[in-house]
Image (tube, grey):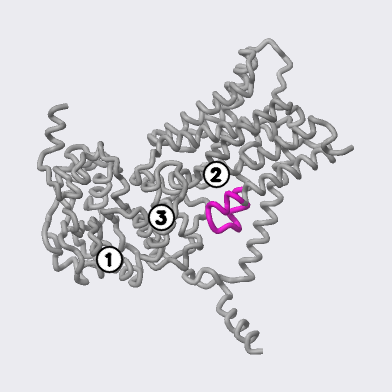
Amino acid sequence: MSLFEYDFLRNAFLGALLVGLLAPSVGVYLVQRRLSLIGDGIGHVALTGVAVGFLLNSSPVLTAMVVAALGAIVVEVLREYGRMSGDIALALLFYGGIAGGVLLIGLDDDDNIPMMSYLFGSPLTTSSQDLIAITVLSAVVLLITVGGRSWLFAICQDEEYARVAGLPVRALNLLLAVTAAVTVTVAMRTVGLLLVSALMVVPVATAQQVARGFSSTMLLAMLLGVFASGSGMYASWRLDVAPGAAIVVFALLVFVVVAAGSSVFRRLRPARQLPHSFPARGATAAPKVVGSLRDS
Amino acid sequence: MNETRMADNEDHDPAAVVELHDGVVNYAGRRALNGVTLRVTRGQTMAILGANGSGKSTLVRAVLGLVPLTRGHVHLFGIPLRRFRDWKRIGYVPQRLGAGSGVPATVREVVASGRLARRGLFRPVTGADRRAVERALAAVGLTDRARDPVATLSGGQQQRTLIARALAGEPELLILDEPTAGVDAVSQEALAATLRQFTADGGTVLLVAHELGPLASQIDRAIVLAHGTVVHDGAVPVLASNDAYLHPHIHADRSLWGTS
């Protein structure tokens, strides 16, 4: 059987690849802010949004997006006014989101709500209309995260400086928060709400091991995200395992390989590019070796 | 409303680049700044000196609107702070690189963010932007490190990166918070040369320092703060430029500036 023989397989693959491209492009800003877990918090809140959708008999994806965006904005406002540590804000999001979702689902008379598919993803149910929606939303998100990266980089790298530079810091922060919420709900279909944050963060963590700059980290993370999504979907199709989990396991495997590889690489070339740091242990012997090689 | 407008225009000096009138700042239940008035005129290089905790950093942060004033008012280029929007005229050099550095960034990326005030929101990079960034890198001697991650630079080089970021916006006023703190002698000399060039081109400088080092000869006027009040206003005090000032352990704020 060919992979693209069926529309649903094709839709699932294309949707997953877009999500793989999208998630790290937002995640790079969250990692830079040291808010890696915020995507998870937004995901939990989106669960409440899904429940609201079922309760109101409207599109759960749409209500998830609205509720997740509201949650992201509330966290951003709390962060800005410094009323609450990021840690506590996250805890409230996590527990409030899950409890709200479970509570609201209990109110619904329908016993057949496919909660598992929202929690862990169900890419095979991606319809052609879903794919169009994913494509449009991806284009908007990428326009913001890639096209607006100079400004988003500035507010994440040094918010105070950005303020003195006259940038609309609050508006940009809210834009980033809403973009993260949109990304979470788009990715919900593929990897599920509980694993979406992994696809936002893990490729970035991998890329920053080897990249030297922000733009290169972002680009590499997006490529790694696409790779993890593609290979995870393929593995899921061939081995009949859960696609969301397979994608995240692939992303983590690449992280482990790159982390191990780059530490070996660094040990082989001790402190060559860091003339101002202290010489690594054992590096004092290195010049002699280089000298003797050159002499011979 | 009428009253505020009168206060806004009070003592209006067209040559003043920075004006702080009777500035009071309460910080964490403590009075960090206690009725400080200062005026920096065009082309001047002014230093704010004082020991740690004397309120000198709070002063520049209040001038920039990063810390709210409890009392008093600030004018930048003759415009009240809350109505001031022309931030491209100001280059701010904070004490150190922002904490948000989970992801690597190259020296050029950090310096280029200093161009955003001039570039406008969501506008593409122009040739003029690129040239300004290259000029700023060259001015601090970091052209050959432009592609390196800032985290791999020494403290002095990171400080120079922040100065280049401010210069990239081609400002008229530079505000530097402790540019000499923890910076090696070579970088201090580089900073002095950069500031000399900046003022020679007509720029105005307001800097906060604990020790002036090689900058001392360029300062037109110095204000010394102790416990949030001005205890000296005029020429650079002799002590500030000699060795005795460089050693904080002799409690410069008490014994040397004659307060308490």
Q: Which residue is mark 3?
A: B128
Q: Quadrant of residue A228?
A: top right
The chain to which mark 1 is attached is B
Q: Which residue is mark 1?
A: B197
The chain to which mark 3 is attached is B
The span from disc 2 to disc 3 (Cα, nearest Å) is 22 Å
A212 magenta-colored: yes
* Residue at 69%, 44% in the rendered image: A226
Q: Position of residue A252 (x, y in %)?
A: 68, 48
Is the C-beta separation of discs 2 and 3 under 8 Å?
A: no
Q: Position of residue A241 (x, y in %)?
A: 80, 37
Q: Position of residue A8 (x, y in %)?
A: 79, 30
Which range of residues does the magenta coloring cover? Answer: A204-219
Q: Which residue is mark 2?
A: A146
Q: Give the structural element (helix, strand or loop) at label 3.
A: helix
Nearer to me, B10 or A265: B10
Q: Indicate left or right for A3 with B259 as reference.
A: right
The span from disc 1 to disc 2 (Cα, nearest Å) is 36 Å
A69 magenta-colored: no
Q: Single out the mark in the foreground, 2 or 3.
A: 3
Kind of residue at disc 3: Ala
Mark 2 vs mark 3: tell me if same chain. Answer: no
Disc with the residue nearer the chain's start (3 vs 1): 3
Q: Quadrant of residue B9?
A: top left
Kind of residue at disc 2: Val
Q: Single out the mark in the foreground, 3 or 1.
A: 3
